[in-house]
Image (cartoon, rainbow, N blue to C red):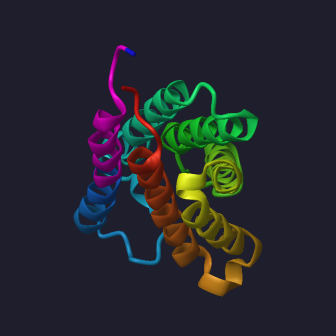
Amino acid sequence: MGGVSGVRLRPLVAGAHACTLLTLLAFAVLTGVPAGAPLAWSGARGMPLAWLFNVFAWIAPGLVVAFAALRLRATLPDAGLAAGIALRLLLLAALAFTAQGVWTLDPNELDAGASRWHATAWMVWNLAFGAGALMAGIALRTVRWPSLVICALVALCLLLPSLFGDQLGARVVLVCWWSWTLLLAWQLPRPH
């Protein structure tokens, strides 16, 4: 099979997540965003260099993971319907992750306009990612238990937001996203 091999997906996915993490940390320090603020606050309209934050926190990493999802699906052509659905949900989640940087928060209208689109992208990312982890847990033996645990954590954050609190819950989901996508990049079969 030509193109980028599965082995090369590992550093791509790890690099995408490192990019998000470093961007979140750097902009929190540079802009003085409080620790309890929404993750996307540094990219909100009116924030210094918000466009740069959005490119490196959401857009570029999301596109890298979307590419990885396409490549992983291509390496498992005979994996079955449930595995195919899991990897397509990974693709959908990655595109929704990207969309969070396209539709940014607007501090003046947190319940309308672009903020509403941002919240929709965030929810699609959560739902597609959680459902994908569940399907992977059912269909892919090599990632079964970690995927099911990750799915359970995401479900808890969505269904019982008071368990972690809004902002801690969002951070737990982000760490689960990193963990699940890295797990897939490391554990799924690679082309020969």
Percent position of residue 190, x then y: 40, 34
Residue located 28% across and 46% down the image: 15
Q: Please determine whether, in this image, residue 54 is positioned above or below residue 126.
A: above
Q: Residue at x 76, y 72 (%)?
A: 159
Q: Residue furthest top?
A: 2
Where on the picture, by quarter, is residue 29?
A: bottom left
Highlighted range, magenta: 2-18
Residue under the point 47% across and 71% down = 37
On the image, which quarter does residue 191 sit in? top left
Q: In terms of depth relative to the viewer, which is nearer, 164 or 77? A: 77
In this rendering, position of residue 183 left or right of residue 23: right
Where residue 66 appears, x then y in whole percent? 49, 33
The N terminus sits in image quarter: top left
Q: Picture quarter containing residue 165? A: bottom right
- Drawn side of residue 179 relative to residue 88, left or right: left
x and y percent of residue 107 in the render? 54, 57
Residue 67 colored in magenta in the image: no
Horizontal side, residue 15 vs residue 133: left or right: left
Image point (49%, 28%), residue name: 75
Observer-nearest of 51 and 63: 63
Question: Vertical placement of 167 versus 190: above or below?
Answer: below
